Amino acid sequence: MKTLSAFFTAIVLFLGIIAAVAPKPTLYIIGDSTVKNGSGKGQDNMWGWGSFLHEHFDTTRIHIENHAIGGRSSRTFITEGRWDKIVANLKSGDFVIMQFGHNDNSAINDSTRARGTIKGIGEEVEEIDNILTKKHEVVHSYGWYMRKYVDETKAKGAIAIVCSPVPRNSWKEGKIATSEAGNRQWAEAVAKSNGAFYVDLFGLIVPHYEAIGEEKVKTEFFTSKDNTHTNEAGAKLNVNSVVAGLKSLKGSPLIQYLKH
């Protein structure tokens, strides 16, 4: 009996060692300044929701990296090589949460940003000599870039979660204006067609804003600099909707890592 007991004790210890050295899955976050503003430390009182997402996860069991960066679109996050660096490290069991759209409506070719994408989810292209980068470039649709993120995530055995853009602080007759309606619909379409999970952040957040009211939202949840960037309170309100959306995803393995 002592031999059998010692055997089971050894098995338990062995399994414990394996669990201790096994690599944790990584949750990668990619997006624009509404996800991470600047270095993510709240400069100029601007915060993105990704800076607070780790507070809702058991980080002893999952590693979180926020690679979102201000000013980027679904196109420029790729053309600057940022996505390739993530793909190189992606492994089976990892997760990628992606939220692009705010900057995709910019000019396709100019001397300041050159970050716009073709509207929609089609395969049409526009060839340009990029004024900013001085390089020849083939520009695709918003949907094309989002499909690339999803497909390359899945090819690594990782799990893709597409989010719609969060709403701006734009109002019309007491209701949030739907300036991101196109990108919201296109993000959902890509998620459905390419087998990714989808979180409608716009749809989740707008009811909160409208219940709070235009004046209070403007003064308490956004900075005074523009109608896009949230302060700390606004980012935390938004991240609560992110978490609610993640918890609603049936069959998503990410749920097991959330704090309950």
Image (spheres, grey):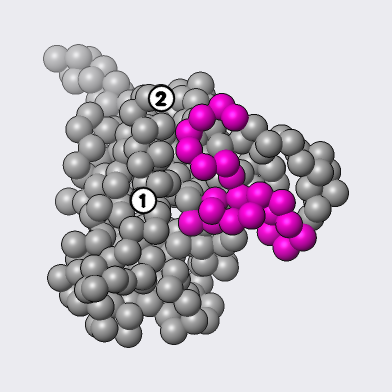
Mark 2 or 1, closer to the camera: 1
The range drawn in magenta is 102-124
**Neighbours of disc 1 within 10 Å: few (<14), some (14-19), many (20+):** some
Marker disc for residue 194: 2
Q: Residue furthest front?
A: 173
- In screen coordinates, is 134 left or right of 255? right
Q: Residue furthest right?
A: 134
- In screen coordinates, is 157 left or right of 123? left
Q: Position of residue 16 (x, y in %)?
A: 33, 32
Q: Using the rendered view, name the quadrant where residue 187 is placed.
A: top left
Q: Nearer the viewer, residue 35 or 19?
A: 35
Marker disc for residue 60: none
The residue at the point 19 percent across, 42 percent down is: 248
**Secondary element at tag 2:** helix
On the rendered image, what quadrant is the N terminus found in? top left
The residue at the point 69 percent across, 42 percent down is: 79
Q: Nearer the viewer, residue 30 or 132?
A: 132
Q: Position of residue 204 (x, y in %)?
A: 23, 54
Amino acid under disc 2:
Asn
Predominant secondary structure in magenta? loop
Q: Is residue 120 magenta?
A: yes
- In screen coordinates, is 258 left or right of 27? left
Q: Is residue 100 magenta?
A: no
Query: Can residue 63 be seen in this snapshot?
Result: no
**Secondary element at tag 1:** helix
Instruction: Report how far apart the C-alphas of labels 2 and 1 lie in the structure.
Output: 20 Å
Q: Position of residue 72 (x, y in %)?
A: 59, 54
Q: Using the rendered view, name the quadrant where residue 144 is placed.
A: top right
Q: Nearer the viewer, residue 4 or 50?
A: 50
**For marks 2 and 1 on the same chain, the one whose residue lies earlier in the sequence:** 1
Query: Can residue 183 be seen in this snapshot?
Result: yes
Marker disc for residue 181: 1
